[in-house]
Image (cartoon, rainbow, N blue to C red):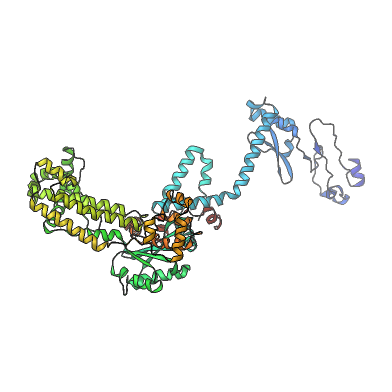
Amino acid sequence: MDHWFKTGSVSKIKRKTTESNDPIHTQEVPSSITNISTENLNKLPQVSNTKFLVPGKIRKYSEEYLCHGFSFITIDNVAKPECVICGEILANSSMKPSQLTRHLITKHSDLKDKDVTFFKRLLENKNKCNMQTYLSSGNANVDAVEASFRISYNIARSGKNHTIGENLILPSIKDAVHCMFGEKYVNKINAIPLSNDTVSRRIKDISYDIEEIILKDINNSELFSIQVDESTDVAQLAVLLVIARYIKQNESEEGLLLCHPLTGRTTGADIFHAIDSYFAEKKIKWSQCCGLSTDGGNSMSGCYSGLLARVKAVSPLIKWTHCCIHRQALASKPLPADLKGVLDDSCKVVNFIKSRHTNSRIFSLLCEDMGSLHKTLLLHTEVRWLSRGKVLTRLFELRHEVQMFFEDHPFRLSSKFNDHEWLQKLAYLSDVFLKLNNLNLTLQNSAVTIFQVNDKIESFVKKLEFWKTCIENNQPEIFEALHDFLSETDMNLSQGIKHQIVQHLNEFKTAFAKYFPKCGKEDHWIMFPFSEIYFKSAVLSAREKEKLIELKTDSSLQAAFLEKKSLITFWANVKDEYPELSYKAFNVLLPFTSSVLVERAFSSYTFIKSKYRNRLSVSSDLRVYLSSVEPDFKKLSASKQAQGSH
């Protein structure tokens, strides 16, 4: 003190270093304090007669403090003790064994006897958690964006409303996380953006990504084919759908190429303009398109102004296919007058019961009381391919229940169910339309080839001839329901009914010959490349026949052909070695045989765009809903700025 009064400055404070277990950082007092002039003495605050406190004393951390349960954390370049148990941070002045031990005994008395290895383990776990938190915090929002894309993808795949994300999915996830992991992790779930607009944008981005993948695959494919149809939705909007088939990784694959609203007319010119504009925009070449499949409507198949005529103008070699299922349905329409009357009466009976709610409920209770296999009848819909067979089969199976129902509910056609001849005709119709339904279902397979269609139609036509012979020879067992009814009533077919059945089968045969003309065998070498018979009938150039000889004598290829998944797979595998033959095979195998895929797509369209969502733009949702292509979620997430919410 005397020195300070004499010189106006203080000497550097020296501290004893003998204090045990309390290493203290020795630091020079700043010059702003040590060089205090006499004239500034009066400006200093008055200090009581106690030891003068010098600022700047900073205690350093020692590893020995870990045995007291403390590590350290640096705040503003000052080390402060941090409890490894509870995480409490003390002041730097508490960086001494006595203070640290006091905290351990006071706050964690049950752990005061633990050795240093226990606290080391706690510290290691704490550091590991901190590192994981540090690493994950930077990716938290990026992960939330990817989660948003994946959930939006699942919403589109289910065809549900976009609002389901924030109204159902997100609350459900939060509840599940809260129950299983606690409230701490729920905050991370809140970072997933799932608002209605966000989900809509995500689905559009996903749809665009899927479209880019499909377009890339089409451009990489040597050939592709399309099937086209248009329909009107619930909002009276005409919609054009185009589905493409192409080769990807030596397999045939289908995908939605175009979903386009036709705002004006739906003529062949309008349809072609929509498709042609899309092809030009996406740089798709008409020369690569080898097949076009449509229904038989004038706007599609018209040879002068329809879509077919306009496509032929830009791609003369394209092969048009009239949907085989539509043709089969048209060929199944002819009915003799008496059998047509039975069908009409059957529909009236069904409508009398089904269209009146009271009758329908009473009939269901009656079927239940009688222990029937079915409890209700089916309504007939002309536009549904399988409707007639299902309606007639169900009505014949429930004929006893219908007869009993009419005892208490008079109807002008109730007497028909006591007329055995009328019931014989009903049994025959249920049988024959059930067989037609089975044919229809086999043709609905999207992977069926033109060869398989021809084989199935040829088989059915031969069956018609065989059934006619059986009826003429009094062998009705070929028709199961008719045979069972005749056995049940101990009756034989009358000549009149025989004549009607034979006439009906002949009309069937004529109609099928009209809609399915016989095809030659010139392309059968594609299906049987190792057959000598079809080699002779093949319409090929001399060079192509030479290559076919080389192929059919290759034993390794013959073994591969026997193990093939499909004809397209086989010809795709040999396209590098036999490009001319493969190209001809693709021209026959790639074209669609029906338009069943666009028919199914329209069913999906009406499911997505219901009367409650009649202003929805369906294109993106429909592409995601129908596509088997999975988008690149990582790329989509990286293209977006990660934010907590949208």
Q: Could one spot residue 89 in this view of the protein? A: yes
Residue 65, image x, y percentages: 73, 32
Residue 357, image x, y percentages: 18, 49
Task: Locate residue 431 relative to residue 497 in the image: left or right.
Answer: right
Q: Could one spot residue 229 in this view of the protein? A: no
Question: At 88% across and 44% down in the image, what residue appears?
Answer: 10
Question: Could you say which is closer to the camera, residue 433 or residue 619?
Answer: 433
Task: Locate residue 36 relative to residue 454 in the image: left or right.
Answer: right
Residue 492, image x, y percentages: 9, 45
Task: Locate residue 171 relative to residue 61 in the image: left or right.
Answer: left
- How many marks overall? 0
Residue 465, image x, y percentages: 20, 54
Residue 488: quadrant of the picture: top left
Residue 500: quadrant of the picture: bottom left
Question: Could you say which is closer to the camera, residue 306 or residue 547?
Answer: 547
Farthest residue to the right: give it.
6
